[in-house]
Amino acid sequence: MRRVMLLTTTTGYQTRAFVEAAGKLGLDVVFGTDRCHVLDDPWQDGALALKFQNPEESAAKVVEHARSRPVHAIVALGDCTPPTAARAAAVLELPYHPPETSDICRNKHRSRLRLAECGLRVPRFARFPIEADPSSILKQHHPAIALPCVLKPMALSASRGVIRADTAQEFISAFKRIRSLLRSPDIQVARQETSNYLQIEEYIEGPEIAVEGVVERGRLKVLAIFDKPDPLVGPFFEESIYVTPSRLALGTQAAVVETLRRAVEALGLYHGPLHAELRISDEGPWILEVAARCIGGLCSRALRFRVPYKDEAISLEELILRLALGENIGEIQRENAASGVMMIPVPGAGILQRVEGTDDARRTPGIEEIIITARPGERLVPLPEGSSYPGFIFARGPTPEFVEQALRHAHQKLRFDLSPSLPVL
């Protein structure tokens, strides 16, 4: 039986979807997770206990395990696992992105440097230690700090810690707020060097899009271009609705694909998934980020793909597993229907008591599924400090416009009952 190793955090949403896809393909699954390494297999699933903040050590454990139980593919879920996967795959001679590329894609500063050096259109940017004085930074008159500008952490995802500043006072306040976030225990526990810096960059006007794709032995295959119909203008950048196919002009979409192809070449992405974020200005596409992973959370449920001569659609997870196993995925295409997902915005800070209206929301035409991931008693934290959404809404229909409206109408029927959270002293 072919065996796949899934590298995942214990808090990841996507693990179950990959396990289900592996079951359809008849694969044996072994896990590598960041669970407590002191306990002896607490969940009785034979998982390796790894420390993803140390990819060399974790990769060595994966390789040692594979010597006795050979694996035929490695798949990394989430942001912190690809560097480990890349190192292990290189030793085991499995196709994957190179280790250096996985490291670069995890660091917003290094990836911007590489893309800029290769002539890609990226916002002007500069990196500063979190201990720096923001007032002194303003006096440097660096091109990246021309107001308005955007301040962001170096390695966090889902717009966590990203703040737009239009004035000097907003700049100073944003800098200090990100500094406090990066000093928080849940981030410091990872012991990442990137947590000691933040990036300041030029604000680019224009709509933002996301692109889901894969690289098959150096060749880019775009799976979907997602429009983000809600304007992301700040001061925080909470993403909500993704809809595909894109309503951008075909010429603009072609420019996006070509820009991303050049980015793949510049970064050295070779084999595996990618998720990219871009802005579209009058000048054309600007690259904000290229991550060596697939789309996060449960958002992948918005995508289905058709395999030639088969009636049943497959998931993004199955497609990625097929790719990791070396199968030819060239003829697999996204379904014809329009689809989309809403990452339900955090309704406010507080303790979740209950969510009402879900049954009514599910009856909205076009809605396929509503998943509330937050549990009663859970503390909800809005951006820029928050790191998760309370749930997801999924829709399908004949047109992107239909899907977008279905998502909005369903969301309007949901009611979140929150109680104030007591401050931690």
Image (cartoon, rainbow, N blue to C red):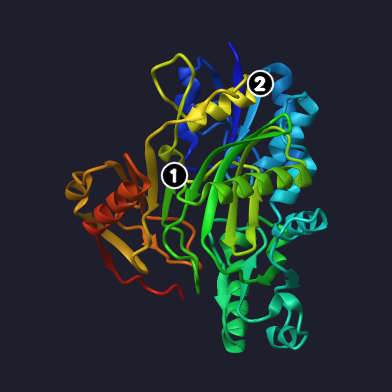
What residue would you read off at disc 2? 326
> As drawn, is 89 to the left or to the right of 312?
right
* N-terminal-most mark, 2 or 1: 1
Between 147 and 55, the one nearer to me in the picture? 147
Q: Image quadrant of residue 328?
A: top right
- Category of crowding for the residue at label 1, using alpha-carbon neighbours closer than 10 angstroms: few (below 14), some (14–19), many (at least 20): many
Q: Residue at x 79, y 54 (%)?
A: 114
Residue 390 versus residue 65 in the image, above or below: below
Q: Position of residue 320 (x, y in %)?
A: 57, 30
Note whether 419 is above or below 393 in the view shown: below
Is residue 54 visible in the rendered structure shown here?
no
Amino acid residing under circle 2: Gly
Residue 48 location, quadrant: top right
**Which residue is tagged 1?**
244
Q: Residues within 10 Å of mark 2 (few under 14, many from 20)?
A: some
Q: Nearer the viewer, residue 164 or 91?
A: 164
Residue furthest out toward the right: 117
Tell me which residue sits at (76%, 84%) in the image: 141
| Residue drawn at point x = 51 percent, y = 61 percent | 207
